[in-house]
Amino acid sequence: MSDLEYGVGQALGEGAEDYDVGAITEALRARGIQDVDDVPDEEFWALVEEHALPELDETSDLARFQAEMADAVKTPVGIPAVWRRGGVTLEIRGHARFGMGMPQELASYRLTVAGGGAVDLTDEETFSWPRLWETVDAHLTAWAAEVADRHAAYEQAVDAEARAAAAAREAAAAAERARRALAEVAPEGMGDVEQATMSTDEVAAYLGIASGSVRKQMSRWQIAATYERGQHRAEARYPTAEVQAKAAQRPGQGFRSDRR
């Protein structure tokens, strides 16, 4: 930045952003001026006004809505016009294609919000552009809030699912570590976690007796059976721990005298 341009900026102060400082500097330099102080105040400020930047034309929400509606209603005769923004749709029938004054005596307006039903707007809601926009904007705001709430709920559910999956993996890993630890110290054949109950055939195989003798043996040991639905009839199940404990108490500490 040259000294002259810096001087112009200093002279304009906080209002510098409203003027083309570079163009003012070039205009002064073209006149052979190298210092702002060499320019008479009246001449300097006249030059400044010549290089004022145009004000930004900020379109209001209402103006934008009117412009979009003007485009929407330019449909062939007999085809309803449709204005849509986000999850809000406004279907318009009978609106003049070029006369945009309100109210439109022959027009009807049906508003639909995504996820909800359609409602016909009343005359009170459509008698002027500001009133119509107020009605539509209220539905837009409510729709946006609903989307935000549901998105937050979805993100929470996804996070919960991820945490549950991680916990399940950790639990499975812990169970495997425990199984391996048990296998290191358990007698041969006991390394795997056994089922809680045994069928009649499983008890017979474990004790080395005939299946037909199991019921009598269990009665002698006072081990009660539970019954589960089998393929054709109820199936007797005996508690594994009790069967093993009674078997271990037989003469010879596990020697099965009934085996042949």
Image (cartoon, rainbow, N blue to C red):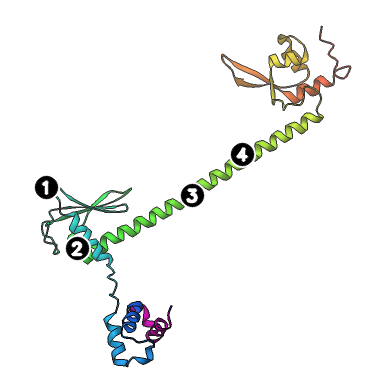
The quadrant in which the C terminus is found is: top right
Q: Residue at x 73, y 23 (%)?
A: 240
Mark 4 and mark 1: Cα distance apart in space? 61 Å
Pointer 2 or 1: first along the chain? 1
Is 62 left or right of 7, judged from the image as shown? left
Image x and y of residue 68, in percent: 22, 58
Count of numbered circles on the image: 4
Q: Which residue lies under the disc numbered 1?
A: 78
In the figure, residue 202 lies in which quadrant? top right
Image x and y of residue 122, in percent: 19, 58
Give the class, few, some or many, for how many residues have Cα within 10 Å of label 4's Cα (few <14, many ≥20): few
Residues tagged 2 and 4 counted as in contact (Cβ below 8 A): no
In this picture, which residue range is highlighted in magenta?
2-19
- Which of label 2 and label 4 is nearer to you? 4
Q: Which residue is the extreme one toward the right?
A: 252
In the figure, residue 237 lies in which quadrant? top right
Pointer 3 or 4: first along the chain? 3
Pointer 3 or 1: first along the chain? 1
Could you say whether the residue bearing mark 4 is in a helix, strand or loop?
A: helix
Q: Can you say whether 97 is above or below 245 in the image?
A: below
Please check the rendered image and state whether residue 9 is part of the magenta-colored stretch, yes or no.
Answer: yes
Q: Residue at x 37, y 88 (%)?
A: 36
Q: Amino acid at mark 1?
A: Gly
Please check the rendered image and state whether residue 76 is part of the magenta-colored stretch, yes or no.
Answer: no
Give the class, few, some or many, for how many residues have Cα within 10 Å of label 2's Cα (few <14, many ≥20): few
Image x and y of residue 212, in percent: 71, 9
The dot on residue 86 is none
Could you say whether the residue bearing mark 3 is in a helix, strand or loop?
A: helix
Mark 2 and mark 1: Cα distance apart in space? 25 Å
Q: Which residue lies under the disc numbered 4?
A: 168
